[in-house]
Image: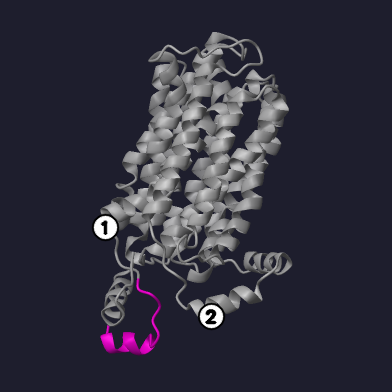
Amino acid sequence: MDKKKVVEANPHPPLIKPRLNFWQLWNMSFGFFGIQFGFALQNANVSRIFQTLGADLDKIAILWIAAPVTGLLVQPIIGYLSDRTWHPYWGRRRPFFFIGAVLAAIALFLMPNSTVLWMAAMLLWVLDASINISMEPFRAFVGDKLPASQRTTGFAFQTLFIGLGAVIGSLLPYLFTNVFNISNTAPEGIIPPSVKYSFYIGGLVFFAAVMWTVFTTKEFPPDDIKKWEEEKLKSKGLLKGMVEITKGIGSMPKTMLQLAVVQFFTWLAFFAMWIYTTSGVAQNAYGTTDPTSKSFQDAGDWVSVMFMVYNGVSALAAFLLPVLAAKIGRRFTHMLCLITGGIGLILIFFIKDHQLLLWPMVCIGLAWASTLTMPYAILAGALPADKMGFYMGVFNFFIVIPQIVAAAILGFFVTNVFNNQSIYALVVGGISMIIAGLMNFIVKDKGDETSDEIIEEVMISEKTPPTYS
């Protein structure tokens, strides 16, 4: 590519983002360790808490609807607001990291002290909304700070911390019971002490990890601060903001629509797994449906170990996936991982020995690692920089809509079609994940990390040096 042509085509080039070193990538991603620590506790234990407080099996899915609905409402709004936020010290995304961390920590402390079912259900709404306030801007953070040549690596760092946080968060109840001899049983209607202490630690870790990113990472100002302020004034006001959000949804990039189909079937599968693994494993491998029994609580602890395994595999796979993607492409990497994960979910149905249940989780871990990396890496190159946060929030629609669908229909199917055998919900999830893998055939990856773009970055950077990182 001719250097003169590049400069002529960019007479007022945008801020050139320097490549970050290992520790800069570490610092900007570390907050995800705390976020996923909280999510892991939620995913592995909320069904257990609901059943302990008296929820019927067919009602669990609808109680879980709080999680996707809050994401549907919160993420586009937070993305829109964070795109229009700038403070010389706090930056653009970090104010939302901070606020979400404070609220999520409080909710994590309150959740295991629920005394009635409606209280736990309400706190799930609060907890999930708070986590979403912190989490959504983290996705846009990568697009904000990293050049195209580092975006897959940036999302891989996030996946690493997601995996590490989820490993420890998932394992905590099991460790408290089997290492520290803290009881995993309690009188009827009371949350066991091992679960309570796990949530308390989760609140502390969530807050501390997010604060690490907030206070160790700087942000770039908008490329043209004057123009940005003028645009912000034009869009000021809640009504105008909602109009802009609606228009933005109607003009989504084609790549986002293609990935939406993949995301729909992927997240329907994961949501089925989060809701029904505890009850399914308790019935299929431990032979119990009684939430007050020790066998059921032991099953709950073992599901925490199973979730630890898939998250651990995800953390280990985080940096292998970019290598594979460089050889066969990101969409085919994602396809391979999702099909593998779908097979893993189906295998859970056939395994009666609880220790052998760890092997399918290895397959699911590969799918989870890819789900947290590849769609975002593909999408980031197709989004306008000034709407990165907003579109990352809108992209969340295709995560939460399938979860809402799952919450609405899975309870009916488990009760009326599967005769209260919730293990079949995992088989449905496995089939859905395999379909998601095959749907990658329709995705067109623009390949935002092409060599021409990397050369262009270097050429422009010779003319316009970076400001700060």
Q: Residue at x 64, y 21 (%)?
A: 51
Using the image, determine if residue 130 lies above or below residue 250. Answer: above
The mark tally for this picture is 2
Q: Earlier in the sequence, mark 1 or mark 2?
A: 1
User: Could you tell me the amino acid type at mark 1?
Assistant: Asn
Taking the spot 30% from the left edge, 57% from the top edge, the residue there is 326
Q: Which residues are magenta?
A: 1-16
Q: Is residue 199 left or right of residue 326?
A: right
Is residue 21 visible from the viewing direction of this image? yes
Type of amino acid under label 2: Lys
Drawn side of residue 391 relative to residue 138, left or right: right
Of 398 and 85, the residue lying toward us: 85
Q: What residue is shown with label 1?
A: 21
Taking the image as shown, residue 410 lies to the left or right of residue 24, namely right
Residue designated by label 2:
227
Residue placed most toward the observer, 31 or 408: 31
Q: Secondary structure at mark 1?
A: loop
Q: Are discs 1 and 2 less than 8 Å apart at CB?
A: no
Q: Is residue 361 visible?
A: no
